[in-house]
Amino acid sequence: MTRLFDRWPVLPTRDRPDTPDDGGADAPAHAHSPSAPPGRHSHHTMRPRRRQRSQRLLANRAVRDAIVSLAGVVGRPVHNQGGAEIGRLVDVVCRWTGDETYPPVTGLVVRVGRRLAFVDASTIRTIEHSQVLLKTARLDLTDFAPRPAEVTLADQVLDHQLVDVDGVQVIRAADLYLAPLFGRYCLVGVDISTQSLLRRLGPARWRHTPTPDRVIDWGAIQPFGETEQGAAPEVRLRTTNQGLERLRPGELADLLEDLMRPERQKLLDSLTPEEAADALEEMDPEELASLLREAEPGRAGQLLGAMEPDEAVDALRDLTSDERAEVMAAMAADQVANLARLLGYPEDEAGGFMTTAFLVAATSETVASISARLADDGGCPDELDAVALVDDEGRLVWDLPLLQLLINPGDTVLGDLVGEAEPVTVDIHARVNEVAERLVDARRMSVVVVEDDRPVGRILADDVLDAFLPERGRIHFPRLLQ
Amino acid sequence: MTVWGSRWFRGFIIYLAAAGPGLIAANAGNDAGGVATYASAGAQFGYRTLFFMLLVTVGYVCIQEMVARLAAHTGKGLAALIREQFSLRLSAFAVLAFAVANVGLVVTEFAGIGTAFELFGVSRYISVPVAAIAIWLLVIVGSYRYAERAFLLLSLAFITYPIAMFFGHPDWKQVAVNTFLPHFIRSKAFLLVAVALIGTTITPYIQLYTAGAVVDRGIGPEEYKYERVDAVAGAIFSDLVSMCIIIATAAVIGGTGALNSAADAAKALAPLAGRWAETLFGIGLLGASALAAAVVPLSTSYAVAEAVGVERSVSKSFRQAPLFLGLFTAQIIIGAGVVLVPGNLFRLIINTQILEGVLTPITLVFILVLANRRSLLGAAANGKLARTVGLITVVAVGGFATFLVSLTVLGWIGISL
């Protein structure tokens, strides 16, 4: 859990950070040169070592002193060079750009008298546990107005939801830590420990001692702190954590389920439609329905269009007919026609859970032409394992395993590969038990669905597995009663 | 969309068919605490509390509307909103108040279970521990979904109240006069009943539930205009049922003094059910209490997890969530434990509603402040009218609670007014 110090060069610190006049402002300039972040490790093998290392580091009081607790310093006095108090710290402003692992502090919001003033970062000398020192005696106090890509940490990030990309979890920031890095203050870590919550609840003097017990390096965080109106989509995209791309669809689905609506929509926006669709396919159907409901119809239609037809139909079934019509109005006509046809089949029959993204070929085609079609068409799922072969009248004659395409020369006519036995099929009205039995009997990973001897879809073994697995034990308090 | 075409009405039909209880929030009047309190109010003051209920309804509608609006526009549950919008100390205070109120409710529900079984001749020292273990197991094993259907079916017995009301031939002129003609009674007994009526109607739990349900259904700002109809209609419907309970009881045993037993409360159903009145009342009480005895502690755990920021532990697996599971278990133990202390169970139910009434204003203040915040809701923040009505509601509810608490504290040191 304590990941803060892995990627972080040893901190420049002073022994007595509490004394204002020992050149604190110079300290950041001594910061070590950036060290390349180490590659990703497996959490399991790295954890003991990590813990040891961070414990050793945290035992070092100097390190503890160098990081400043945001929750502790907010509300503390801001002093000018002469030592006079000019006001109280209200908030710390950071800039998200995505270029830097650790967002730099761009300024402070200070309450001077009755107004909120913005103090630029260039005038900060040090931010200490219990006070802020400025470099100058004179100050141009400008009213605070957030600029694009800027967030106020105490107001918009502290106590809000964040995604820990390395740990694949949704967290709520109990504290944020600032530290001088390369000559300026940066946001370096987020604390999620209950201890920090208790520290903030306790007496004021507890508050400024950092308790970095469960700290996550900011480099592993996907933040959401953008203001609703101010953020252009491109700004949001630039703040996407690279680590998100490495998550599996199932992990993304978990994150989407745990996030609240605004954060969830922002996370979705930062994914490509394909990535998003893959993740949505893994979501709990009821969660998915509510997600589609809350998204704009256009966006929902786009996401559904990118999903596999059988999963999209599942999601549509959970919407009311009005909502369904609204979403489908935003989709391409051929997709709508396909989904509407699938919706017509009862949910518990083969037609209701088959996928229509499958491959049909005439017996007259060759191995090479099928390979070419497969190469062109991205619409087929990776799990596809066979080609349905049909005769001139469209009737199914054979279910050809894809392996045959690999081992036969390109000019082989598919008709020559048709086997002796009857192809393994299920009827469009087959129940899930029947489909499972057929799959087990035939020892196949998928089975063709036929209507009047014509192939209309395919059921993959994993769709049948879903039907047999018990529902996940997600406790959803309001939904307990539905 | 009219009321009759709304999801609320469809929900009502479904409710009648006992297929799905989407109306649980609106149906708050039918929980053990509600039925006991309304019945007792009817028995003690006849129709005299109806005007007060009308005022409570106005406040209830206003609060429910605000909660639904907050949830639809922010997409967040109440506990999460409070954590994000208030300082950590205030959030902790809000969550603590909510948790205490809910533990009170859990006590109510177990008292309801005990009372119901006593009507059937089973001692509470057997029924309550067995019920506590059974409910704990049902939720932990995950088969609660099936049991809740049965409980719901049982709780439908209370839907007979409006019918019993007509069979009891109340004095309709008196009903109308007492509902619409402003009046109060200057007595401590009335104050106690008033606070209990507030507490059982505007329960913090219902607000949390409403927000959670709105977020969960994915209702956003665009759909809010329909949700508003639902929220308002649901609140009005719930209070209509409550007033039916008061009228039905008042018609049969009005003016006989505060109720002390479920058997007396059941007399209100006698005009309809005759000698089966007690059985009918017992069945309804058992169903409603058992239903809420599982859901209320879950809502506490949910709110605390949301506020602490460990929602993820809730979403993974119930058994892997120590905070969630620990809180749930503790509430069941406390709830059942308090009920096992010798004393009048029926009075315990009403007294816990007074506790709710004292704690309700705390949650209401948070809701009002949130709904007033332009930085949070933008144009959907409370306008002048909603601000004023909300403020009056909160001040009135808070005033009653404060007045009651001060009277009680003064009573301890020997001063009585």
Image (cartoon, coloured by chain):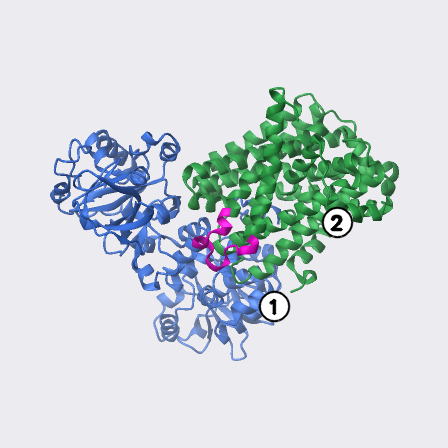
Chain colours: A blue, B green
In the displayed structure, A355 sits above or below A178; it is below
Residue A171: percent from the left, percent from the top?
39, 44
Q: Is residue B75 visible?
A: yes
Q: Is residue A464 visible?
A: no
In the displayed structure, A310 sits above or below A413; it is above
Report the side of B212 relative to B344 (left or right): left
Q: Secondary structure at mark 2?
A: helix
Report the side of B169 relative to B146 (left or right): right
What residue is at 34 percent from the left and 32 percent from the top?
A204
**Chain at numbered mark 2:** B
Q: Give the amino acid at mark 2.
A: Phe
Q: Nearer the viewer, residue A349 or A121?
A: A121
Please give the residue where the numbered disc 2 appears in the rendered image.
B180
Residue B244: percent from the left, percent from the top?
77, 45
Q: Which residues are magenta?
A: B369-386
Asked if badges 2 and 1 are on one and the same chain, I answer: no
